[in-house]
Image (cartoon, grey):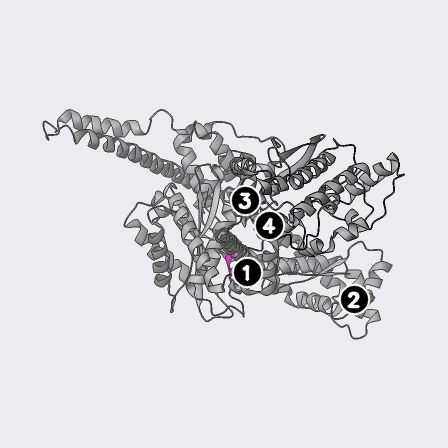
Amino acid sequence: MNNYCTHVPFFVSFIIIQILSRCKLNNNCPYSFSTAASLQLLPDLHAVQGFAIFFTETHYFSFSFFCLHRLFFFIATGGIWKNKDMASMDETNIFDLPSDTHNSISVDSLSSQPVDDNRNEDERNSNQANEGANRKKRKKTSIVWNDFDEIQVAEGVKKAICKYCKNAFATGGRGASTSHLKRHSEGCLQRSVQMASQKKQCVIPFKPSNSSNPFISPGFRFSNEKMREVIATSIMVHEYPFSIVEDDAFIWSFQYANPEFQKVSRKTIRSDCIAIYEAERKALKELLKSVSKISLTTDMWKSSHQVIEYMVITGHFIDSGWKLQKRILSFVKVPAPRRGIDVANAIFKCLKAWGIEDKVFSVSVDNASYNDSCLRYLKDYISRSTKLVLDGALFHVRCCAHILNLLVQDGLSRIKDIIHNVRESVKYVNFNDSRLKSFGEVVEQKHLKERKLIIDCPTRWNSTYHMLAAALKFKIVFSEYQEREPHYTFAPSNEDWEKVEKVCKLLEVFNLATNLISGSEYPTANLYLSEVWKVKQVIDDATKDDDLFMIQMATQMKEKFDKYWGECNLLMAVANVLDPRVKFHGVEICFPMIYKSEEVAAEYVNKVRASLQQLYNDYVALSVEESSSSQCNMANISSATTQSESAIVTGFDQIMSLVRAKEAIPVSKSELDAYLEDSVYIPDGNMSSFCALEWWRNNSMKYKVLSKMAADVLAIPISTVASESTFSAGGRIIDEYRSRLNEESIETLICGGDWLRHKYNLKKKKVNESLKEISL
């Protein structure tokens, strides 16, 4: 009991000091003192860790008396000590202070500080403001505050605001529980969505709303597998080498676009190209199943960097949308000795692989000697499995462009010396800059507007024509240039220029005809007759020229013309009749001009009528066969469940079969007769924009059988330019750096590239490799 009484003064004084200190913090006490100042009331706290020292018997009385004394003095003076060390102390509990701070606080030092009894209220308010500014907030350590912002909503009231959903939560300040904040953070939906989006890959943001890139779709995300497909496609379409994927700059560009891009080797990208080729081949094979007839062009080519000779086979057909389509079907090696039968076997093997051996309508080839025997064998192979329309009269088609080339070469041989002088003149001017500059000065003096010369390719007659036509515009310049250049000895004479001018007028018709019939994106068979007629007309006019030179040249060209077109060409006649703009009028106008003799022309016109009727009858028979085949299929399905009562064929059944055969071809008027009796179609506007195939598509309901026949005939290519153009790609692919490519890789790049260009509607840049232009 005695000990307990001695404790009372100490505890009472200590509790009063703490209460007053807390009141000060809450601005409820008029006295200006702090918790740190209240430490001055304590005795030496050097051993604060052993708090029990306060309760020893030797200190009970003295310490209690001292605490009461300091309390009264503290209240009397307003609780202010001007101890600089005390002023800088944090308002924290004594047990939060470091040990060195405890050691620096002593009663003696505190009691020795002077006290200003005359301090006014303003000075006390100023010290309160300084004390608040010097407070040091402790940093929040809970990770939950990464998702919350603490704001003060009222005096002494704070709220925690979620950074994602903006909901407010109560917070008790320092030391208060954050469990409710953590629970909200874990269940906050907006936070979960945002955190999930940050973990996903970045969406490539380069797709515009109107992008035509077939590899980009809404929501597209980068994929290395898709990137490999894009690279393989570009290699096949643009004929890049496989090794481009190993070039450093190539890799850098893709890694810059997306750092996740993983480089691939040439072997990997080759495998990707082959995989794409196989997929596109399968798709094309499915497309060909829906095609009724297909026409082919084929040609042979030998690479200058290999000893292998290749054959290309190109298919031409009309799809279900009445569009003319062209696809390279094969680019394969033909083993020696490459006789006609060897080529025929290679072609038939390709047809079997595609499953179109019974759909071949015609084959267009050049005039090479082995092609005649090749097509005889091939025609025999195909006739064994299917019947050729018109008994195969349209099967063998000679390349019209090749025939025109033979005619022109015979004519140009008459002026080969003049052509040589013109060619050497152009080369002389283009030898160096000084000669070209000197020639340009003469052009300026003559006030000529032309500024271009052309160097030809001697093996391409059309490039020779362009060279002569361009040089003819500078004939006066060449004459004067010879006076300035003593070493220039190739200037043509005035007589030579007159011959060049006449030849160019003749070759202009040949050039226009070649360009027109060499197209592969529009039907050309219906244009065949009119262009041959125009060529025959200019040749006949040249034979009547006053110049013996022109007569001799035209006579030689006429002999070649009669060799290939002296007999009736059924293809160009039938196709012309199926052009609704002319019908039979074209044949009746052109044949007398081509064949001269009226009796021969009339005989050929009748032959065309009979052949056209027979061709139509063949298509009617095919149509009846297709319809009966479908009916038989239905009948087979029905008979599978119902057994026939009798297998005996009655007389009435035989009569009905004959009636059906007669009714298959109406006696009154066929579609062909109706078509020929109708008036010709006169298109509005530009005649060159008319497409016969589109007309037949629009009238396919009126002429159901005839429109199918017209589509197959109009799809026949009358030149092999489509196949020959493939060799330009072959020359670029099998260059001196890639001469060791195997057959599989070559066919993949050439065929696959052609298929992909059609799939994505891409066109190769047309580069005229036979011309070299010189700008003055």
Q: Nearer the viewer, mark 3 or mark 2?
A: 3
Considering only order in the chain, which callout, 4 or 2, is on the residue closer to the N terminus? 4
For mark 4, what is the residue? 52
Label 4 sits on a secondary structure element that is helix
Considering only order in the chain, which callout, 3 or 4, is on the residue closer to the N terminus? 4
For mark 2, what is the residue? 436
Q: What predominant SS class does the magenta segment belong to?
A: helix
For mark 3, what is the residue? 216
Task: Tell which residue pokes out farthest to the bottom in this image.
Answer: 487
Say which amino acid is labelled 4.
Ala
Rendered position, 588 above or below 438: above
For mark 1, what is the residue? 240
Q: Nearer the viewer, residue 660 or 538?
A: 660
Seen at 78% across and 75% down, the residue is 487
Considering only order in the chain, which callout, 2 or 1, is on the residue closer to the N terminus? 1
Q: Nearer the viewer, mark 2 or mark 4?
A: 4
Q: Residues within 10 Å of mark 4 (few under 14, many from 20)?
A: few
Say which amino acid is labelled 2.
Leu
Calculate the distance from the C-alpha at mark 3 to the C-alpha at mark 2.
50 Å
Quadrant occupied by the C terminus: bottom right
From the viewer's perspective, tell me whether residue 273 is left or right of residue 58.
left
Estimate the x, y position of residue 678 in percent, counting from the top left. Answer: 48, 27
Q: Nearer the viewer, mark 3 or mark 1?
A: 3
Say which amino acid is labelled 3.
Ile
Calculate the distance from the C-alpha at mark 4 to the C-alpha at mark 1.
91 Å
Say which amino acid is labelled 1.
Tyr
From the viewer's perspective, tell me whether residue 621 is left or right of residue 326.
left
Considering only order in the chain, which callout, 1 or 4, is on the residue closer to the N terminus? 4
